Amino acid sequence: MIDYSDPNLPRNHRRYSSSSPSEEDTRSPAQKDRDRIIYTSAFRRLAEVTQVASPTDAHVFHNRLTHSLQVAQVGRSLAQRLRKDPVSCEQVGGIDPDTVEAACLAHDLGHPPFGHTAEEKLNELIGERAGGFEGNAQSFRIVAKLAFKSTKHEGLDLTAGTLAAILKYPWLKRENPEKPNKWGAYKSENKDFSIAKKVCPSGKWRRSPEAALMDWADDVTYSVHDLEDFFRAGIIPVHLLARASENRERQRFFDDVYRRRGKAKNFPPRNVMEEAFENILAVFWRIYEPLRWNERTTLQNALFHFPAHWEIHQRSGDRYQEEAYCDRRRTYERGEHT
């Protein structure tokens, strides 16, 4: 089995210093990387960056800091689950939960507010001659150069394994003709990029398995909380899709989804997606009977309780789904909801 704390492993190589442990510090190299990222000013600044609404609005929306923490939790859990099959992990070069967690914490450091729209505008303003702008490449630049932990060198001096796990796009600008507008590092960080590429799988544009886990954890996490934030902001009326009386609206929704994505490889059949969609919505709204709102009840009450119910459901599984749905039905029938 791979000893991920072994300082002699290529994945634990650092550009400026050694990964050898000391008597006073028993952390693994990847754990040190994780802690270095957490204590950067760039990580703290993520609290002021949001996707849906201003962080100063009345409702508590997700920001890039809470998002990064959630991605780290999901990524680490995925890695721990895969580590139950150590043979398969070794076949792909190793999967270290600490490395995945560190990469997840760092993945959004360079992304601007307002998502891809701002990213494209910054790329336009900076221009081709200056190297352009790409959020993932900027994240790599922050950990490799802009953030610091020592006066003796630039950057955080992360291990090759963690640098590789941060590389969602393991190529420089214009190197991959299939994705000309995406790249993982600027030429100014080419030395650190080369260190990371040494521990990536063979193949010109293949990323490490830990980078793949980071990317997947990011997709899962933002898909869930962006929907929640858009709903709480009153932009996407998800509750209408949950009611039997709005079946036509629900059908239009799925028609649009499968018009855009239905031919994609491995995209689930429509009947499977509709069943999963209905099972999730059943936790929060009554599907087959209209809601009995009294004078004091507004949509804001439902919005307020949505995150708490979702969190409990995530922790407790299907049993909570059944119990919560029954409890909410009884509450609405008695007219005791507020």
Image: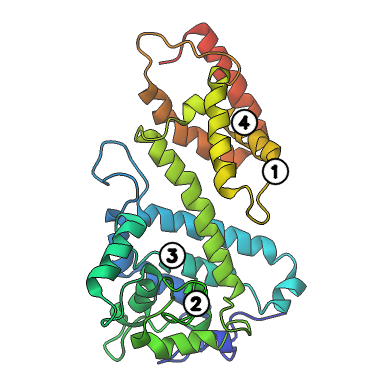
Q: Which colour scheme is used?
A: rainbow
Query: What's the distance in space between the residues labelled 4 and 1, CA to CA?
Result: 15 Å
**Split into 4 quadrants, where in the image is the N terminus?**
bottom right
> Which residue does the numbered mark 4 point to in the structure image?
278
- Label 1 sits on a secondary structure element that is loop
> Which residue does the numbered mark 1 point to in the structure image?
269
Whether residues under marks 4 and 1 lie with C-beta atoms below 8 angstroms apart, the answer is no
Above or below, comparing residue 287 to residue 311 in the picture: above
Residue type indicated by callout 2? Pro
Q: Earlier in the sequence, mark 1 or mark 2?
A: 2
Q: Which of marks 2 and 4 is nearer the N terminus?
A: 2
Left or right of 252 in this view: 108: left
Left or right of 200 in this view: 53: left
Residue count near mark 3 (Cα–Cα under 10 Å), binned few <14, some 14–19, many ≥20 = many
| Front one among 17 and 78 | 78
Q: Is residue 279 visible?
A: yes
- Label 3 sits on a secondary structure element that is helix
Residue count near mark 1 (Cα–Cα under 10 Å), binned few <14, some 14–19, many ≥20 = few
Residue count near mark 2 (Cα–Cα under 10 Å), binned few <14, some 14–19, many ≥20 = few
Residue type indicated by callout 1? Pro
